[in-house]
Structure formats: C-alpha cells, structure tokens
Amino acid sequence: MATATVPGQLASAKGSSGWPIWGHDAAVATLQQAIRRSRVRHAYLIAGPEGVGKTTFALAFAQALCCQEPPAPGLMCSVCLACRKIGRGVHPDVQTFSLARQAALAEKSGGKNTSLTIETVRDICSTVALRPMESSWRVVIVDDGETLQDIAQEALLKTLEEPPPFVVLLLLSDDLELLLPTIRSRCQTVDLRSVRTAAVVESLLAAGIGRERAEEIAALSGGRPGWAHRAAADRKVLQRRMEAVDRAFSWIAGSGYDRLVTAVRLGDTFSKRRPETFTDLETLLGVWRDALLLHADQPHYLTYRGDAERLNELARDWTMNDLHRAVCSVQTCIGHLEANVRPRLALEAMVLEWPTSPPPGRP
Ligand SMILES: [Zn+2]
C-alpha cells in the first residue's frame, strides 16, 4: 500500500509552482509569498472536497517551512534530511492528527471512530506547546477537521487564540460549514478547488504511473489529484467510484416515483451521510454533464468515458434543454445543501426538474 503515489507521501518531482503539487498554483503562490515575506500565519484552514489533495498540500507546506537547504525562500529541496523525513511522515516537528491515527491509538476501545475526540484535541494542544527540535517551526496538521464536534472545536480554540510563536497549525476540512465561525475567523483559509484533468494526469505521470492508466484515472477523478493517487494505489477506490456511477445511472433511469423515493431516502439520512451524499451528487452531476457533452458532440471532455454507451442513451433520448436543466438542478441542489436548506426539500426539488418521459427502449 505504501508507494510513492499515496497521499501523505510526497513525490520529489515538482509541478510548475515549484512544489510537488499539480494544479493548485494560486494557493501554493499565496503560501510561498507568506514564507518569502516572513508573514507565515499561525493557523491555516485548508479547505476543499475530499480527495482534492489537502494532505499532500499540507505536507508540501511543511517541507517548504522546514527544508534545510531551500533552493529559494518558499521552495523545498526535497532531498535534505528534513524534506525526506517529512515526505515519509517521520519528522519530529511535523505531526499529523487524523481519524486514522486516532483509531490506531484507540485500538482497544473498539468504539466508533467517526469524529476527532476531545482527547485527540488535548493531544493536539500539548503537541502545539512543544518547542521544535530540528527546525524552526512546529507544524501540526489536523486532518478530518470537519469531524470535530463543537466541544472539541472549543477546546481547540484556546490554542488558536494564543499559539506559541513557532507553531503553524494546519486544519484540513472537507466542509467549512461544519466548523464554528470562531474557528474559521482565527485561521487564514486556503481554498483548494478541483484542478484541470491535465494537471491530474501530470501528477500521476510524475508518480510513475503509465500514461494510459493515468488518463483513465484522471478522467474519473473529478479533478481531485488526491483521489487519483489513491485510486492508482488501490483498485478498491476505483471500484467504489464505479459503484457510485452505477447508482447515479439507476437513479436517473428510475420512474418519477422511484426517483423521489431515492431523493427522500438521501434527504432523511443527509445529516449522518453528509460527505457521501455530496460525493453521490458530484457523480450524478458528472453523469448528466457527460450526457449533455455527448449531445453537443463533445466526447473529448467526458468524465465517464468507459460508460459512453449508457451515456449515449441519455444523450439521444433527451433534448439539450432537458439535459441542461438536469445539470442545473444538481448544481442548485448542491448549493442548497451547502446553504443548509432542508435536505429532503432540496433533493426532491432536484429530481422534479429532471426530464420525465421515459426514454424509448426502457421499461
Ligand atoms: Zn529540503
């Protein structure tokens, strides 16, 4: 499992920004400038969808801060002892806290591991207080920040209010809405959006993946390099993505009644399955968008190339207008859910916008 392609391990090759990061050039430039001008903040909130590359980005920032022989301020050499230790996750001044780490530490408790606990936050706070041993910074990365419950966030606040001068805390979150405004206001937010497919291909090539496979995975990645690297290292990740695509196709193919039933079910479980529901909606959006692209005779931009046949059916049987309205309905629904509209309402309104006449050739 541990290959050079897994997020959390850094490649030594570099993208155009000078960091081992492909795509997030504006975000990289902001942090490089902060280092160059000695204006590094004590807390950053690195936000973006699951798999967009937040962990890799955080580790690259840590390298740029701690590198012993930076080619220029804000860059890392990738080969000094500090860079290599960070790349392997063993630098004593760079710690990552995450659900995975918490689960490994609490193996015997056997409880559910769905949120970062107050105990983990206490660990974070005591780590933050320790002077760095090998570099001038202590970098504390808190992954899965969206799972911190309010009480744990409040415990973290104190550290954010009075951070020791040598500390840089990087809070990673899939979903800013789940963080208290008091937390958000004390961090500088770095937004990582999905990147161009070509950038995902480049990052996979740099990690030694063959071109054909890199293009196939990148097309499925939805512009999320972190996901792409996981998929390259683990076939199950790709498998789960295929299953999500199947779910999207059957939702679309269902009768008006079946579509509503699915919408209601997802609406009612939204609070417990928030990230999964967003992933399902992104997949659904991709399927509708692909059908629209095919209808417009633009097959080069397809996300789900492997499903061209099923997509062709949708493209053929509905009009451009139908497909466009469906695409917009999913975008609106995602926006509504992010704005905390009642989930069931948002999802029902979405499916009611879809073209209803059952396409010929289907039951
Ligand atoms: Zn270095």
Image (cartoon, helix red, strand yellow):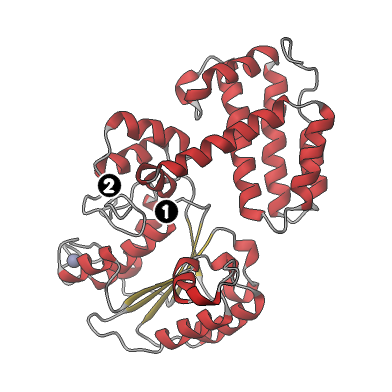
For this orientation, the residue located farthest to the top is 361
The quarter of the picture where residue 151 lies is bottom right
In the rendered view, would you say 220 is above or below 126? above
Please, what is the three-letter code of the amino acid marked with disc 2? Ser
Please, what is the three-letter code of the amino acid marked with disc 1? Gly
* Residue 90, visible in the rendered structure: yes
Tell whether circle 1 marks a residue whose Cβ is less than 8 angstroms from ligand 1: no
In the rendered view, would you say 24 is above or below 133? above
In the rendered view, would you say 136 is above or below 37? below
Front residue of this view, candidates 108 and 271: 108
Which mark is drawn over residue 16? 2
Which mark is drawn over residue 316? none
6 left or right of 190 in image: left
348 left or right of 39 in image: right
For the point 28% across and 79% down, the residue is 92
For the point 36% across and 50% down, the residue is 25
Front residue of this view, candidates 188 and 313: 313
* Residue 36, visible in the rendered structure: no
Q: CA distance from mark 2 to mark 1?
A: 16 Å
Would you name the residue on which mark 1 appears? Answer: 53
Q: From the top left corner, tell me how far across and down residue 208 is, in percent.
A: 24, 41
Q: From the top left corner, tell me how far across and down residue 53 is, in percent.
A: 42, 53
Q: From the top left corner, tell me how far across and down residue 227 is, in percent.
A: 44, 47
For the point 82% across and 28% down, the residue is 256
Q: Residues within 10 Å of mark 2 (few under 14, many from 20)?
A: few
The secondary structure type at the circle numbered 2 is loop
